[in-house]
Each structure stands twice: as structure tokens, then as C-alpha cells.
């Protein structure tokens, strides 16, 4: 007996020690995840991109679409419904409901497997955030221990708030706020009793009880939640009956609202993508800023960090930009257009249109890559020249010529349509956009200086120091051009463009705030002179179609093959650049709406439509007065009133006049020959559709002077007039010029050679030999295809005009 007693005593002591050890472990949680980690836990939250007026234009989220709320932002019905169905003794137990655990334990032993749980709301939160979802007895014990500790650390209300922000409701919605917004288009504080009960019903098995996937099961469980709420005294039987009377159906006028299809931002999609890239570069380049999000990558911070990104986009200007493009290029097969508008004194991007349709083309022409700007780049040559003391009245021979540069480079250059203006000054060459003068000018100032000036003013693309950049042979994008022209609008001060004003976290703590930093890159007197000349380029030069009723300046640009057309213009308040062309390649625009596309046609028209609306409520601002000359003590000036249209001394009959200062001896002395007492007004005849000879005779017959241009047309036969300017019915002064465009017939087409499979050098030779230009794009590929053409556009055998650009993709390791 004594031996048995000793054995029993030892066993009892062992059991007591084990029980005590277990209880000590249970209440201390040694070896378990530490609750302190909850303080470091960052639940995924949806980030928001916000326009200048506070409108949310995009929401960015990863797998978990969540936005946290406080408990007082959740209606009582929802809180009661969740407690009633998930944990009716939530406010009585200490984190673990021992009675429910015992009941579940017995059921699971009888069944031989885990079939019933008894987790409290606290345990569910612990499982979701700390221990994971493995269903074993030991994991339940860990949950119970941590739940007990959690309830000693936080209040019941705080635990309920954390749980309701964490729990998954299906349809990608985490937390009650996103679930309320998606399911019912409401905030959690606005839910009805029926809606609250339905959300609580979904929690147990979100996919099975989803009102979208299984409305019958969802309705049955919703009704069970309502019954539980009656049993526990949260609502009356009549309130439950009224809530049950609402069927669980999906529709705009039903209890549950349809889920919108996932799509790119409907508002300013190109701008939204630009902001995403900006955010990535910001967080990738700032280790201290990134460290505030623990070990999250820049992408994870953007999509999971709950950022509030306050941007510069003006939604009214964005709408005006989109409408200006859509109303101008409104026919099938029309080229695309891109527009970017920047505020000169802040650098804020106010509007950005990167192409026709984001769903079809994600490449953002407004801010990515580049296209040749043509004569719009002459502005940087002009600014460099004036900065280096060259007078706007210095004269140059404008005849086509071959120029030789100090390094031995020879350049054959001519003017548009082969024209020549004799000896003219730099001012006139700018207004008329005379190529030869600018070729001579860049030889005087040096390509390197021009490239440096362009980059200082805001061009960030690579600018090779070649003479041909004078005529826009480099590649730029509309954002750069709007920003650089805005430097002139701000009197020579460059302010880098920005799309973001401020970034906060979900709690409103400021992470980043933009401070505009301007830098003078052009002398104020130089900017004033350039502005004055570019104002005249719009008043009576190639940019006439862009005229608006306020001080403005600008420059057109057209490439040699008519594949790119630009208008870049600005006021002291807003700078905007418009590009028109085909994004898929250098496709000549010789017949769009029956005309050849120049910078002074569709781009200028789009710019005008946009700026008139964008500045509708902004009082006009004047540019500073220009002083043309630097040796003021030695030179005299004279101020005269001239006719804007003729450039000669104004008469009382001139409808548009302006005052201009000249160096003495350089001012016009002849009176206007267009508007005088002998002049008569005549009506321009309609000649579109006539033959060239008939049109010329008709124009001369009413006392006007015909100017004939030629263009290919795939719709009009050779020799027929396909366009005229001014339009038929316009009243003009006798002797005025009327430009007509005559069809040269269909554009000659050649078969594009198939170069897929060739090496890069052979492909280039084949395309050049067939009369095409090419652009090479490199793409990662199998090592065996490195240096080999793996695709081309247009494809081999397609018809294209000689000189068209063929894009080839070459593999690389």
C-alpha cells in the first residue's frame, strides 16, 4: 500500500506540475506570437488618387481592398448583427468562451474530426492576424491563450473595431467599409437593418453566402441573423419581419447593388498611370520614406499602403482637353492626339491626354517616349540666339542651300514646299517658320548651346548636339514641351512639372509635400523678346488658327514627312502642347479630312478649343514689354502702329492693329496695301471638287490670288481640288491670297518586306533598300534570338507609302 501511495503521490505531483505549467504557459503565452506585433501589423488598405478639387479619380489596391473606419462610423445594427451570429456572449467572456469550446470538443470527438468551432470574435481576429488558419486542437489552444491576453490589452470595443476592419466579406472586400460600399453603395453608418444582417451573414463562408453567387443561401442566413438578434433582444419581431420582407436580389433598384467591372480609371487614365510611375520612383528613391512602411516594396506601398495622393489634375481642364481632341479628330481612321497642360509658375500638370483610348492603347504619348517636334524646336534655337546677343533683326539668306559646319559636316536644307523669301531677318523667319534661316542660325550659335538651353528650359529627353535639331530632328514629348514653353511664360524661370502636391497615409499623417522650386534659366529681357516674337507667330504667322482673345505666344511644328504635327503655346497663366500623329509609326498625314496636316491645322485648332475653355474664368495677363536691343545708348528706337495682317503701317480701315517698337531705319514705311480706300471686299468662291485650272480661273476671276499646294489623296482623283483656305463664302479684301490643295492621286504604295528572322543589320538594309525608314525596339528574348528580328509592324507584305516607318523588334539577352 505504501508503494502504491508513493506512486500515486508522484503521479499527482507530476500532473499538478504539468497542469500548473500549462496554466502558466496559457496565461503568459511564452513561445507564442507576441501581441506587441499587432502594433507593427499594417493591414492592407486601399490607396486613393485624388484630383485638385478633392474628387477621388482612382483607387489602387492589391488582393485586399480595405479602408479602415472607427467603431463610431459603423451603425449599431451592423455591430449587433455580427455579435448575434458570431459571438453572442462577446461582452461577457474574457476572450475564450469555455462553454462553447466544451460543446465543440465533444461534437468533434464524436465525429472523429474537426467539424464544429467555437471561436469567439477575439479568437477569430487572433487567427486572422497572428496564428494562421490551420484547424488543429493545438492551434485552438494557441488561439485561446492569445485571445485571453488580447482582452487584457485592449477594450471590447477596440477588439470589435479591429475585427470589423479585418474580416473578409467576399468580392475582394476586406472590412466593413469596402463591403458596405461595394454591396450597397453606402457607408457603414448608413446601412439598414436588412443590409446589416446580410453583411453579418456573409462572414462565416463568404463565397457560399455571397448574395452575388448564392442569393438563396444568403437570404436564409440573413434571416437566421435576424432571428438571433430578436432572441438576444437587439430588435423586435416586427422589425425582423420587416427586414425579412426585403428579398436578397442584385440590381440597381434591389437590396444588393451590382459590382462595377474592374477597369482602368474612367477619369484621366493616362494621368493616373503617370501618377503611379511617379509614386514608384518616389518610394524607390527615398529609403527613409520607404522605411515608414516596414519591409514593403514600392509597389506594395502604392497598392497596400492606404496612401492618399493629392494630385494637380484639374478635372474641368481635363474634360476640355478630351473634348477638344474628340471634336476635332472625329472620323474613323483619324490620327491620334496628345495634350499636356502645365501651370508655368507652379509646374502643376493640369491636364493630360495621352492618346485616343486608354483601353486600346496604354502607351502615354503625352509623357512617355517621344516624337520629333519639327519647327516647334526652333524656339530653343531662337532663345539661345537672343541670349547670345543676336538681334531679332539680323538678316539671313533664306534660299535653299548646303551648309558646312566647323566639324566638316554638310547639310542640305530647304524650306517647306521649296519656298524662298530672299534675305529676311530672324524675326520674320520665326513668324513664317523659315527652315534655312534657322539652319544658318544654329551654325552661328552652335548645336551644343541649343541642346543645353533646351534641357535647361525643361526638355529631359536626350538631345544630340546635331545641327538638324534646329528643325526638330530629336524626339520629345508634349509634357516636356509644355513645361519648356512654360519657362518662357514665367519670364525665363523653369519650374519642374509635378503631378502630386501631397501624400498622406490613411490616418492623415503627411508623408510627402511638394514645394515648387523655380530656377531662372533664361534672362528676363531675353524671355521678353522671345515672347514678343512668338506672340506675332500666332497673330499673323503659322499659328494663326490658335488665336484666342488674350495675350498668347506659340509655335507650330511639322516634320518633313507630315508624320508629326505640333502646336505648343502659352499665356502667362497656362502652357499647353498638342501633338497629332499615328502612335504606331511615322505615317504621313497627307489626307486627313481632305487636307495635309500641319502644326497650324488640327494641333492649333485643338489648342485653341482647349485654351479658350480652360482660361474662360481667368482674367488675361500681359507679357512683360520687350526691349529689342542691347546697346541702348547707341541705338534709337521708333514705335509705330502696324496692320496685324499685312505688317505694314496701319490705315484707318485696318480691322486689327498693334503697336510695335523697331530700331530706327528698320520700321515699315509703306502703308497697308490690303486695307485702303481703294480696296474692295469680295467673297471667296467655292472651288473644292474643281480641277486645278478651273479653280485657279475662278479665284482669279473675282480678283483674288491663287496659291496652289499638292497632296496625295486616296479619295479624290488626281488634279481635283480637295481643300481651300479661306473657306467658300468668306469675305476678304480684293487681292488676298486663297490657298488650294490639289490631289496628286493615291499615295504610291509599296510592299513592306518581311524581315522577321533576319539579323538586325540585314533587316535595316532590306527596309532601306525598299524605300522605308525604320525604328528598332529591343525586347528580352530567348538567347538564341538575340540580335534577330522577332516581329515587325506593319507586317511583311503589307502596303505602305514610301518613306513610312517600319517598327522592328529585335531580341536581346
Image (cartoon, rainbow, N blue to C red):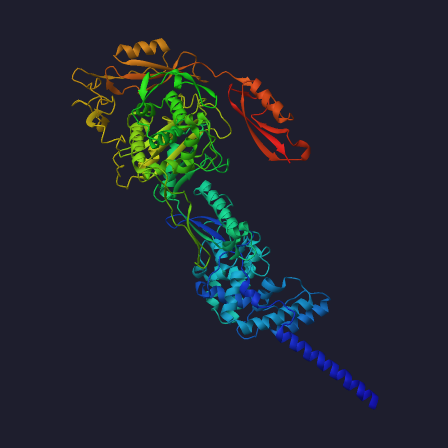
- Residue 360 picture location, percent across and down: 51, 35
- Residue 289 picture location, percent across and down: 49, 54
Check the image and name the residue furthest to the front: 634
**Rendered image quadrant of residue 809:** top right
Q: For the C terminus, give its image quadrant.
A: top right
* Tally of numbered tags: 0
Q: For the N terminus, give its image quadrant.
A: bottom right
- Residue 472 picture location, percent across and down: 43, 27
**Front in this rendered view, residue 617 or 640:** 640
Vertical relation: 541 (above or below) 221: above
- The answer to whether 146 appears left or right of 669 in the picture is right
**Rendered image quadrant of residue 205:** bottom right
Residue 602, visible in the rendered structure: no
- Residue 180 picture location, percent across and down: 48, 57
- The answer to whether 506 appears left or right of 134 in the picture is left
Vertical relation: 658 (above or below) 109: above
**Residue at 40% from the left image edge and 33% from the top image edge:** 578
Amino acid at each position: 500500500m505504501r508503494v502504491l501511495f508513493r506512486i500515486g503521490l508522484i503521479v499527482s505531483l507530476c500532473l499538478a506540475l504539468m497542469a500548473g505549467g500549462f496554466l502558466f504557459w496559457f496565461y503568459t503565452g511564452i513561445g507564442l506570437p507576441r501581441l506587441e506585433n499587432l502594433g507593427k501589423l499594417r493591414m492592407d488598405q486601399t490607396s486613393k488618387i485624388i484630383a485638385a478639387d478633392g474628387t477621388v479619380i482612382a483607387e489602387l489596391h492589391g488582393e485586399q481592398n480595405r479602408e479602415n473606419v472607427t467603431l463610431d462610423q459603423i451603425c449599431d445594427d451592423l455591430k449587433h448583427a455580427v455579435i448575434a451570429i458570431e459571438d453572442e456572449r462577446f461582452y461577457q467572456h474574457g476572450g475564450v468562451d469555455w462553454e462553447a469550446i466544451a460543446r465543440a470538443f465533444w461534437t468533434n470527438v464524436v465525429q472523429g474530426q474537426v467539424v464544429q468551432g467555437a471561436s469567439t470574435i477575439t479568437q477569430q481576429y487572433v487567427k486572422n492576424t497572428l496564428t494562421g488558419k490551420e484547424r488543429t486542437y493545438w492551434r485552438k489552444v494557441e488561439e485561446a491563450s492569445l485571445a485571453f491576453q488580447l482582452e487584457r490589452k485592449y477594450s471590447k470595443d477596440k477588439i470589435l473595431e479591429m475585427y470589423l476592419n479585418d474580416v473578409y466579406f467576399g468580392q475582394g472586400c476586406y472590412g466593413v467599409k469596402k463591403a458596405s460600399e461595394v454591396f450597397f453603395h453606402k457607408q457603414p453608418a448608413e446601412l439598414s437593418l436588412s443590409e446589416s444582417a446580410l453583411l453579418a451573414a456573409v462572414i462565416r463562408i463568404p463565397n457560399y453566402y455571397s448574395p452575388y453567387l448564392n442569393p438563396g443561401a444568403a437570404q436564409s442566413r440573413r434571416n437566421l441573423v435576424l432571428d438571433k438578434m430578436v432572441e438576444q433582444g437587439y430588435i423586435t419581431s416586427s422589425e425582423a419581419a420587416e427586414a425579412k420582407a426585403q428579398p436578397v436580389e442584385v440590381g440597381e433598384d434591389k437590396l444588393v447593388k451590382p459590382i462595377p467591372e474592374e477597369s482602368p480609371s474612367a477619369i484621366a487614365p493616362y494621368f493616373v498611370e503617370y501618377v503611379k510611375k511617379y509614386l514608384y520612383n518616389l518610394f524607390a528613391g527615398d529609403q527613409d520614406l520607404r522605411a515608414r512602411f516596414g519591409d514593403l516594396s514600392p509597389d506594395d506601398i502604392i497598392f497596400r499602403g492606404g496612401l492618399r495622393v493629392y494630385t494637380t489634375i484639374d478635372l474641368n481642364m481635363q474634360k476640355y482637353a478630351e473634348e477638344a481632341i474628340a471634336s476635332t479628330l472625329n472620323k474613323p481612321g483619324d490620327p491620334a492626339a496628345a495634350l499636356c497642360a502645365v501651370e508655368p509658375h507652379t509646374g502643376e500638370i493640369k491636364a493630360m491626354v495621352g492618346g485616343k483610348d486608354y483601353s486600346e492603347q496604354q502607351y502615354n504619348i503625352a509623357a512617355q517616349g517621344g516624337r520629333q517636334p519639327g519647327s516647334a524646336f526652333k524656339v530653343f534655337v531662337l532663345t539661345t540666339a537672343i541670349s547670345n546677343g543676336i538681334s531679332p533683326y539680323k538678316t539671313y539668306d533664306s534660299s535653299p542651300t548646303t551648309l558646312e559646319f566647323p566639324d566638316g559636316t554638310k547639310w542640305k536644307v530647304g524650306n517647306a514646299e521649296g519656298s524662298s523669301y530672299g534675305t529676311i531677318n530672324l524675326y520674320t523667319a520665326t513668324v513664317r517658320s523659315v527652315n534655312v534661316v534657322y539652319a544658318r542660325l544654329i551654325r552661328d550659335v552652335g548645336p551644343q548651346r541649343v541642346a543645353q538651353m533646351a534641357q535647361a528650359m525643361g526638355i529631359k529627353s536626350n538631345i544630340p548636339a546635331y545641327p538638324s535639331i534646329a528643325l526638330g530632328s530629336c524626339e520629345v514629348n508634349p509634357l516636356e514641351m509644355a513645361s519648356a514653353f512654360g519657362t518662357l511664360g514665367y519670364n525665363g524661370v523653369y519650374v519642374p512639372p509635378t503631378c502630386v502636391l501631397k501624400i498622406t497615409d490613411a490616418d492623415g499623417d503627411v508623408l510627402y509635400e511638394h514645394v515648387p522650386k523655380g530656377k531662372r534659366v533664361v534672362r528676363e529681357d531675353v524671355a521678353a523678346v522671345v515672347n514678343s516674337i512668338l506672340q506675332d507667330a500666332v497673330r499673323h504667322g503659322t499659328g494663326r488658327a490658335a488665336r484666342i482673345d488674350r495675350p498668347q505666344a506659340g509655335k507650330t511644328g511639322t516634320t518633313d514627312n507630315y508624320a508629326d504635327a505640333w502646336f505648343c503655346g502659352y499665356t502667362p497663366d497656362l502652357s499647353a502642347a498638342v501633338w497629332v500623329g499615328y502612335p504606331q509609326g511615322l505615317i504621313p498625314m497627307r489626307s486627313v479630312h481632305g487636307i495635309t496636316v500641319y502644326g497650324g491645322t488640327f494641333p492649333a485648332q485643338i489648342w485653341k478649343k482647349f485654351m479658350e475653355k480652360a482660361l474662360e474664368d481667368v482674367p488675361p495677363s500681359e507679357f512683360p514689354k520687350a526691349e529689342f536691343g542691347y546697346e541702348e545708348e547707341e541705338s534709337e528706337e521708333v514705335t509705330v502702329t502696324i496692320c496685324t495682317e499685312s505688317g505694314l503701317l496701319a490705315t484707318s480701315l485696318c480691322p486689327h492693329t498693334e503697336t510695335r517698337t523697331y530700331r530706327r531705319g528698320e520700321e515699315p514705311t509703306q502703308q497697308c496695301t490690303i486695307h485702303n480706300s481703294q480696296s474692295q471686299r469680295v467673297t471667296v468662291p467655292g472651288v473644292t471638287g474643281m480641277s486645278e485650272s478651273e479653280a485657279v480661273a475662278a479665284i482669279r476671276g473675282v480678283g483674288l490670288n491663287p496659291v496652289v499646294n499638292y497632296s496625295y489623296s486616296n479619295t479624290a482623283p488626281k488634279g481635283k481640288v480637295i481643300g481651300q483656305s479661306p473657306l467658300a463664302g468668306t469675305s476678304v479684301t480684293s487681292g488676298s491670297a486663297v490657298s488650294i490643295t490639289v490631289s496628286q492621286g493615291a499615295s504610291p504604295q509599296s510592299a513592306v518586306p518581311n524581315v522577321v528572322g533576319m539579323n538586325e543589320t540585314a533587316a535595316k538594309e532590306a527596309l532601306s533598300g525598299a524605300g522605308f525608314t525604320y525604328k528598332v525596339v529591343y525586347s528580352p528574348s530567348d538567347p538564341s534570338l538575340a540580335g534577330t528580328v522577332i516581329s515587325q509592324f506593319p507586317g511583311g507584305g503589307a502596303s505602305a507609302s514610301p518613306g513610312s516607318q517600319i517598327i522592328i523588334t529585335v531580341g536581346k539577352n
